[in-house]
Each structure stands twice: as C-alpha cells, then as structure tokens.
Image (cartoon, rainbow, N blue to C red):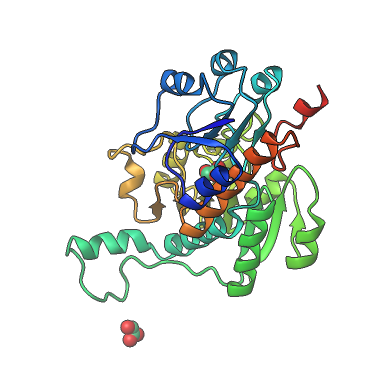
Amino acid sequence: MKVFIARNIPEKAIEHLKEKGLEVSINRTSKHLTREQLISQCRDKDFLILVGNAKLDSYFFEQCAHLKGIALTAVGFDHIDLDAATKAGIPVSNTAGSLRKTTADIAFLLMIAVSRKAFFQAKEVREKQKKSFDFMEDLGIEIENKTLGIYGLGDIGLEFAKMAKAAYGMKIIYHNRTINKEAENLVGAKYVSFDNLLTRSDVISAHVNLSPETKYKFNKDAFEKMKKSAIFINTARGKIHQEEDLIAALQQGEIWGAGLDVTDPEPISPENPLLEMPTVCILPHIGSATVEARTKMAVMAANNIICAKTGSKMPQVINKEVYKK
Ligand code: GLV
Ligand code: GLV
C-alpha cells in the first residue's frame, strides 16, 4: 500500500510508516502543492498525509474517492470538506491533543508581550530609535490578579488557564458549548454567557475551531462591549475575529491591545496597520512550531495511516460517521 506525504515531515514518522510496510513518497520541496498536483500525486496512492492548510474540497474528494484514509498533521480542519470526505467513504484524522502546551505557550507569550508592548519596544531597539530608559513613555499594564476570559475551553484553553492562574493568580471565566467540569475543578473556572465574557474579561483569548458558529465572533459589536483596557488574544484561526473591526476598535480605543498568532489572510500584508501599533503583537502562526510538537503530530498522523492500513479505525478520526456506513 502506498502513502503520499504532501510536504516533508520528521524522519521518525517516515521510518515508522516504512517499518509497517507502507511505500512512501514525499514532496521534498519547500513548496505546497496546488490542488491539481495533489490530485495527480494521489492517483495511484491509497493514503494521504496532508501537511499545511491546502483546501480539500468536494472536487478533490470526487477525484480521489479511491483513497482509504487521509491524516492531517494539524488539529484544525476548517480547510477540509468533511461532508464530501464522508460521502466518498474516506476517514480523515487530525492530531487532537498534540499541541496543547505548545499553543498555550504562545497565548501566554502574547498576553505578556502585549501587556508590556514588547514587540514594539524591541522594534524601537532594533531601529535604534529608543533611549535606554524612560520613566513615563510607552508604559504597559499589569495582568496580575486580573480576569482571563477563555472562549472555547478545551485542552489548549485549559492549559493556558492553568499557566495564567499559577503565574499571575488570574481569575478564570469561560464560554463554551458545554460545561467543562475538569476546568472548573482544576482552576476554578466559571461558566458565563458570551456577553458576560466580553464585559468582564481583562484578557480574552480564543481557543475554538473555526465553524459557521465561531466565524467573526469577535466583531465591532463584541469589541464595543469589551473593557477599554482589554487585551484580545487569538491563537486559533484568523477568521474568528473580523480584522477590519479589530483595527477600528484598537484605533478608537475600544480595547487596549491584541496578540495574534493567526490573521486573515496569512501571511498578513506588510501594509496592515496592526503591524505599526505599539499594543499589538503579531506572530506568523507558530502555535505548534516546536521540534517536539511537530514530531508528535507527524508520528500521530503516521499512526492513523497505519491503523487505516490494517483495516482498523483511525484513532483520531474526525468524521466518525464514515465508519457507520
Ligand atoms: C494548526 O493551526 C493546527 O490546526 O494544528
Ligand atoms: C529601573 O531600571 C530602575 O532601576 O528602577
């Protein structure tokens, strides 16, 4: 059986696939393949490991209905037409649980960096525009004992909440589809309505999947309800916030600052006014970019393919209905 890997992944995962008797071919270039190239590579393959956020749409699934399994090397799956995958009878897996700590680290880093205008200050230093010490200029704000509001309290949100509580004694409130008992017990998190989350949080951080329900959830209306001193953090997906509305909210002082690991589009345009704002910190989607997390993700994807090869269920399958057919 043959597997195609859409971009290079850690050798450990490739070895694992070979040991289990899979014939492996890999796009070793540094470029993402186009949809047509991907389809053509998949023609004579049984499985696909998708690396990156190439869209797999209904046309892809019509052309590649022969595939027996697709493993994503990501937690997010908003780029996949799952209904089309299920219709074609193809199980698709993600890497749920693989980047809990790594992504929480980035949310934490952005929170502190924004509160102290750290990226802006660093830029001034690099461009040698800055005096070494100034008593009253460009002051930040502190986060100790303040309230952290988590939108979407799953494993990443809970990890961030634990860090924020341990480091700064932050009070944790959250809004979710379901009550998270574990978080309530571990960090004393309190469930609140979305409106309450907006009005009460000093720092508000998004950790949801992108879906029709969560798309543009942070818009003009939401930013207006937030505190003028609030910091907005997004390490989930760029479309969770409405970028024009975020820019306006920052320019008009509706909120204090923002830390983004994700933007819409990615990469962000070099002309985007967010890049010039002292209380904004932007990173280029590095939430899972550590050697450890990427290795774990690749091995997890390989395991899912190996399970599919032996005819068992993929452990991290996301379109579970496919197995009911
Ligand atoms: C990264 O954004 C992921 O979804 O894993
Ligand atoms: C700051 O550097 C201080 O000495 O207060």
Relative side of 165 to 287, left or right: right
User: Residue 235, percent across and down?
Assistant: 52, 49
Q: Does any portion of residue 182 appear in the rendered image?
A: yes
Q: Position of residue 313 (x, y in %)?
A: 75, 37
Residue plotted at (58% across, 52% down): 205
Quadrant housing the C terminus: top right
Q: Quadrant of residue 178?
A: top right
- Judge whether residue 231 can be spotted in this image: no
Q: Is residue 273 left or right of residue 99?
A: left
Count every numbered label the image shows and give the total: 0
Q: Is 291 located above or below residue 44 in the figure? A: below
Image quarter of the N terminus: top right
Residue 305, how many percent across, how many down?
A: 63, 38
Left/right placement of residue 235 relative to residue 199 reads left
Quarter of the rendered structure image containing ligand 2: bottom left
**Front residue (pair 20, 101):** 20
Residue 194, by quadrant, is top right
Identity of the residue drawn at 65% across and 47% down: 96
Considering only vertical position in the picture, is 241 above or below 276? Answer: above
Q: Residue at x 51, y 26 (%)?
A: 55
Vertically, is 317 above or below 67? below
- In the rendered image, the residue lying farthest to the left is 128
Report the front residue among 21 and 178.
21
The residue shown at (55%, 42%) is 73
Q: Quadrant of residue 34?
A: top left
Q: Residue 139's spot in the image, x, y percent?
A: 37, 68
